[in-house]
Structure formats: structure tokens, C-alpha cells
Image (cartoon, rainbow, N blue to C red):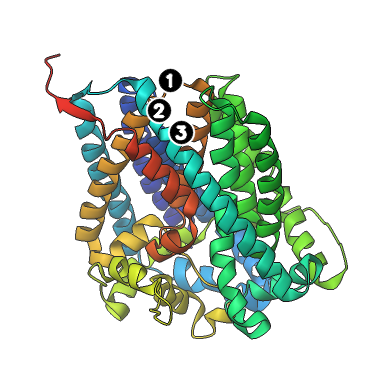
């Protein structure tokens, strides 16, 4: 890649970034409380602006790093980034702008109207806490029983963690190890939602069972860590912890995002530690070496950029799904029925037919929207996302309990940030219970309000 090409591409992405930041600060001045909006925008800036610019500027070093990975690198930078014509770069930038424009337009629609309350906030929150209490009991019971049954099928926690790295590979079938007990790993993930629901109940004065809930809080956190150690890998563990960190910092600082970004950057070596920890469970050998190559961390965030650079060639090969992934995701939940997830074609395109060995490639938000219906899919789905998130942000701003509002704000912000890099609907429906449950909770808060036009 020539120096002039690097400069031109970097300038184009920087212009797109300026557009995003301009609209972000303009909207934030109008509505300061916007957790889901902030999470999505920061995710878009990181994955679609900052990472591409750093990658392009340091492309030769990135290639050297990928080559050092051997077969696991699979020469993707040479094949899918450097050799792509400039029109692919321009198209990817246009899709970023298209996403931002329609998302912002429909996000702002909700703020042109005020909301008149039918019921008092206090009574509404009381009903919400009662629902959370019932839901918490259900998820704690199902999640705990499922996780215990799952670990028991391995012969204990130690044996389960021994096979954890093996089980996470797409090329290995978990049912071959534990048979039908492999189904318990899905419902076991319920336990990861329980600590946050329990903390909401502890924070409110509407319950007299605080000591009881504190015990559930401790137990569910321990079980959640065990679940993450087996099934989810390092990123979900960090996201889980960041929700607590965000809620804590929000109670003491105004500009939480600035500190979160700094903490996140300096915490990147933790990724290496977690990688070695997972290997240790299987081999018994612990060799923690922090990476001295900062670009190795950039490489891990590079796949959304690589995906959107290849939207046109993937469209030519696979066509569009025309919304079928939303239907298939619900049908796929039924026993004995399965469909290829939306990330399968992306994984084949990047890593070939041997992708199950090399690893799957998640679809970022632009790639998933584009897979459904191209630019039209991005327009329609980003508009729907804008409407959804403005309702979430408006409703959460009504919560009177400051501690609970900070906690839910942290969860919504962090998980909507993560949504940018992993937007496959079937993955969300079958595994991201945190974002599903707290989105529903947020929408419930607005069910007893009506829109009323007011003059400004």
C-alpha cells in the first residue's frame, strides 16, 4: 500500500469520524442522559474509525504480526484489506455514514415529543421491582441447576475447566463429551444476569430481604465467573466486570467514559493473562507473557473493519438474506431444528471452508444489516435501532433510584457498545440474555406513559 493511499484512506475515515463526533456532541447537548446511544456511538468510533486508521497507517507492521500467527492469521490483511480497490474503502465509509445518518434521525424523533405520565414513578418502579424479584428467582434457580448439572456431567468443575478450551472451538462438538447435558450450557447463562438483578433489589428500599439478596448476590457472582471461565472466554468476563466499574464510577464522577477509556487501554494486557489462564486449565502450564506489540491488540479489534471492506464481494458471492436471519433465529431455538447462523458465510469468506478450526468471524452491526438487504437493510434496521434506543434512554432517565439508574445505565452502555462488534441476531437471542432482559426492563418503564405534543 502506497503512502499516498494510506493518507487518502486515513483522511476519508477521519472525515467520517468527524461527522459522527459532530452529531454525537450535538445530540448530547440536547439530551445528556443517553446510555444506549453513547454505547453504540463509542463502539462505532472505535471499530469503524480509530481501528481502520491505526491499521492502515501501520499496515506493514500489522502484516508482520499476522504472519507471526502462522495458519491462525490466514493472510487476511494481504487478501482482504491491501488488495481491495479504493472503491471498497469508499463504499464502506458510505455505509458508515448511512448508518449514522438514519440512526440519528430516528433516535431524535423521540426527543421532539414530551411524555405525560399516567401513573406515578414510585408506583411504576414498585411494580417493576416486583417483576424483577420474580424474574430473579426464576433465573437464579434455572441458572444454578443448569450450571451444576452441566459441570456434574464432566465429573466436576476441574474436569469441566480442563475441557473448556477444547469445547470453545467450532470444530469440536460439546455433545460428544457430555451428550444431552450440553444443552444445559445455554440455560446456565441465566446465572450471569442474576447478580445485576439482585443488586437492583438490594439498592431499593422496597424490599425487606436485603441480607437474603446479598447471599444470592455473592453466590451468583461466583457461579457467573465459573460459567465465564468455561464457556465465554475473556471478552465477556471483562464486559461483565466493566458493568460494575461503570456503575461505581458513575456514582463518583461525571465524565465516566473518559476514565473507562483510559482504564480499558491500560487493561489490554489482561487479555493475554486470560488467554494463558484458559490454556493453563487444559495443560497445567502457566506462561504469562504480556505482549510487547501494541498492534496485537489493534489486530483483535480489526475484524469489523475487514468485514465492511468486503461487503461488495460477499454480496456477489452470497447475495442477501432478506430478513430470514430474524425468523431463523427464533425457529433455531426449537429442539432438533437448526439453521446456519448469519456469521457462517462471513467466516467461510474470511477463513475458508476450514473456518471451524481457525475460528468464526462475528458480524459487526454494518455487516449484519448489509447481509439482510444491502444499503436498504442498513437504512431500515438502523432506523429501527434508533427508535428502540431513544425509548430505552427516555425510559431509563425516569428512574428515581440513583444507584439503580447508574447500574442499569452501565449495563446498557457497555452491552450496546459491544453490540457494534457482534450483531448476529441468533447469537443475541440464544446467548446475550443481559442485553435482552435489560432492554425489556427499560421498555417496560415506558408502558404507562403516553405521548403528548407540547410547544417549545
Q: Residues within 10 Å of mark 3 (few under 14, many from 20)?
A: some
Residue occupying image coordinates x 53% and y 32%: 407
Q: Is residue 272 above or below residue 79?
A: above
Could you say where residue 53 lies in the image, as x and y percent from the top left?
A: 48, 49
Indicate which disc, 3 or 1, sits on the residue closer to the N terminus: 3
Could you say where residue 299 lies in the image, as x and y percent from the top left?
A: 59, 58
Looking at the image, do the residues carrying marks 2 and 1 touch, with CB atoms under 8 Å apart? yes
Depth order, front residue of 227/48:
227
Residue occupying image coordinates x 38% and y 62%: 425
Depth order, front residue of 110/46:
110
Depth order, front residue of 193/255:
193
Indicate which disc, 2 or 1, sits on the residue closer to the N terminus: 2
Helix, strand or loop at mark 1: loop
Q: Residues within 10 Å of mark 1 (few under 14, many from 20)?
A: few
Q: Quadrant of the C terminus?
A: top left
Residue lying at the far top of the rendered structure: 456
Q: CA distance from mark 2 to mark 1?
A: 8 Å
State whether residue 58 appears in this view.
no
Helix, strand or loop at mark 2: helix
Q: Which mark is residue 400?
A: 1
Say which residue label 3 marks: 129
Could you say where residue 335 lies in the image, as x and y percent from the top left?
A: 43, 78
Q: CA distance from mark 2 to mark 3?
A: 6 Å
Amino acid at each position: 500500500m502506497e503512502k499516498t493511499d494510506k493518507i487518502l484512506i486515513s483522511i476519508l475515515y477521519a472525515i467520517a469520524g468527524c461527522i459522527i463526533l459532530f452529531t454525537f456532541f450535538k445530540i448530547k447537548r440536547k439530551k445528556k442522559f443517553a446510555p444506549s446511544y453513547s454505547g453504540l456511538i463509542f463502539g462505532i468510533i472505535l471499530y469503524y474509525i480509530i481501528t481502520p486508521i491505526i491499521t492502515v497507517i501501520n499496515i506493514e507492521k500489522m502484516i508482520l504480526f499476522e504472519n507471526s500467527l502462522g495458519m491462525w492469521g490466514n493472510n487476511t490483511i494481504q487478501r482482504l484489506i491491501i488488495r481491495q480497490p479504493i472503491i471498497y474503502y469508499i463504499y464502506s465509509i458510505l455505509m458508515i455514514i448511512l448508518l449514522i445518518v438514519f440512526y440519528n434521525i430516528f433516535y431524535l424523533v423521540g426527543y421532539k415529543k414530551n411524555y405525560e405520565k399516567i401513573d406515578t414513578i414510585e408506583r411504576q418502579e414498585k411494580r417493576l421491582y416486583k417483576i424483577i424479584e420474580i424474574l430473579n428467582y426464576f433465573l437464579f434457580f434455572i441458572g444454578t441447576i443448569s450450571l451444576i448439572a452441566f459441570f456434574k456431567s464432566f465429573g466436576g468443575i476441574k474436569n469441566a475447566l480442563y475441557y473448556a478450551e477444547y469445547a470453545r472451538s467450532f470444530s469440536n462438538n460439546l455433545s460428544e463429551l457430555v451428550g444431552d447435558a450440553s444443552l444445559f450450557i445455554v440455560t446456565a447463562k441465566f446465572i450471569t444476569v442474576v447478580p445485576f438483578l439482585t443488586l437492583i433489589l438490594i439498592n431499593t428500599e422496597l424490599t425487606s430481604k436485603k441480607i437474603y439478596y446479598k447471599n444470592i448476590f455473592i453466590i451468583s457472582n461466583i457461579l457467573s465467573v465459573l460459567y465465564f471461565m468455561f464457556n465465554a472466554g475473556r471478552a465477556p468476563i471483562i464486559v461483565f466486570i466493566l458493568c460494575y466499574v461503570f456503575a461505581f464510577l458513575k456514582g463518583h464522577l461525571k465524565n465516566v467514559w473518559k476514565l473507562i477509556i483510559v482504564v480499558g487501554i491500560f487493561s489490554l494486557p489482561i487479555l493475554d493473562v486470560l488467554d494463558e489462564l484458559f490454556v493453563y486449565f487444559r495443560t497445567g502450564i502457566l506462561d504469562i507473557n504480556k505482549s510487547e506489540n501494541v498492534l496485537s491488540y489493534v489486530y483483535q479489534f480489526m475484524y469489523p473493519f475487514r468485514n465492511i471492506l468486503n461487503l461488495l464481494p460477499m454480496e456477489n458471492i452470497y447475495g442477501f438474506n432478506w430478513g430470514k436471519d430474524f425468523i431463523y433465529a427464533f425457529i433455531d431455538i426449537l429442539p432438533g431444528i437448526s439453521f446456519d447462523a448469519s456469521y457462517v458465510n462471513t467466516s467461510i469468506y474470511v477463513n475458508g471452508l476450514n473456518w471451524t478450526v481457525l475460528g468464526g468471524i462475528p458480524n459487526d452491526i454494518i455487516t449484519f444489516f448489509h447481509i439482510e438487504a444491502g444499503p436498504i437493510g442498513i437504512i431500515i434496521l438502523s432506523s429501527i435501532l434508533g427508535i428502540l434506543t431513544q425509548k430505552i434512554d427516555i425510559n431509563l432517565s425516569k428512574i428515581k433510584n440513583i444507584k439503580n439508574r447508574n447500574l442499569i445505565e452501565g449495563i446498557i452502555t457497555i452491552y450496546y457498545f459491544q453490540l457494534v462488534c457482534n450483531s448476529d441476531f441468533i447469537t443475541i437471542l440464544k446467548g446475550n440474555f443481559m442485553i435482552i432482559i435489560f432492554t425489556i426492563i427499560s421498555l417496560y418503564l415506558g408502558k404507562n406513559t403516553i405521548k403528548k405534543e407540547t410547544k417549545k
